[in-house]
Image (tube, rainbow, N blue to C red):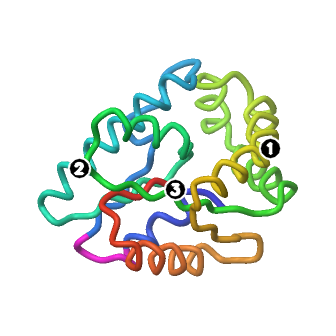
Amino acid sequence: MGKTAVIPHLKQSLGDKFEVHDFDERGVPDNADSQWRVDETEYWIEYGRKKDEGGVTVVVCGFSNPDEIAEIQGKSSDVKVQTILLDADAKIIENRLRNRNTDESVKKDLERAVGSVETFIKNNTRFIPILRKICREHQCPVVDTTHMAPEAVADDVAKLIKQSGIGTVLE
């Protein structure tokens, strides 16, 4: 399941002291690359820092790499960031990506940003074991979404977020 399915339920589960955002909501440029992702991660960490000063926790849903977050935080950020891995069996992730990207406008936008739907799916499924390893190294909580409805995923994530007391959460 994707961000679009989980975000509304997550907003409802978390309440007023939280802001929930889509990592890509500021737009994805043509041929988005790792530098774009790092730049966006820096933006969201800084945004979270500012909101944390006002007592609001920022939750950003989308692809985040804990190694990149740690590197950014090592430079200057004073806000605590927690990554939560929403995981599933690789075949299920592949099927979800394939089913989610059948609409022509979604396909065109994805092709504009990263090349092709097949390349996007292949790159994502190839990176799954690497991301799992990175998340283990950073002791990220994991929610196995394999057999879960979006509402249940949101409830589990909300519980983890509330227990962590962290200022910014990137999923």
Determine which residue is flagged by label 3: 171
Give the Cα distance between marks 2 and 1: 32 Å
Q: Is residue 25 above or below residue 166?
A: above
- Left or right: residue 126 compared with residue 163: right
Give SS at disc 3: loop
The numbered mark, 2 or 3, whose residue comes first in the sequence reads 2
- The magenta segment is 12-17
Q: Which residue is mark 2?
A: 49
Picture residue at 34% right of the left edge, 32% below the top: 75
* Spot occupied by residue 43 in the image (x, y as percentages of width and height): 32, 36
Q: Looking at the picture, which amino acid does disc 2 mark? A: Arg
- Expressed as whole percent of the image width and height from the top left, the position of residue 23 reads 45, 45
Residue sticking out furthest to the right: 91
Front residue (pair 45, 140): 140
In the image, which is nearer the foreground, mark 2 or mark 3? 2
On residue 125, the disc is 1
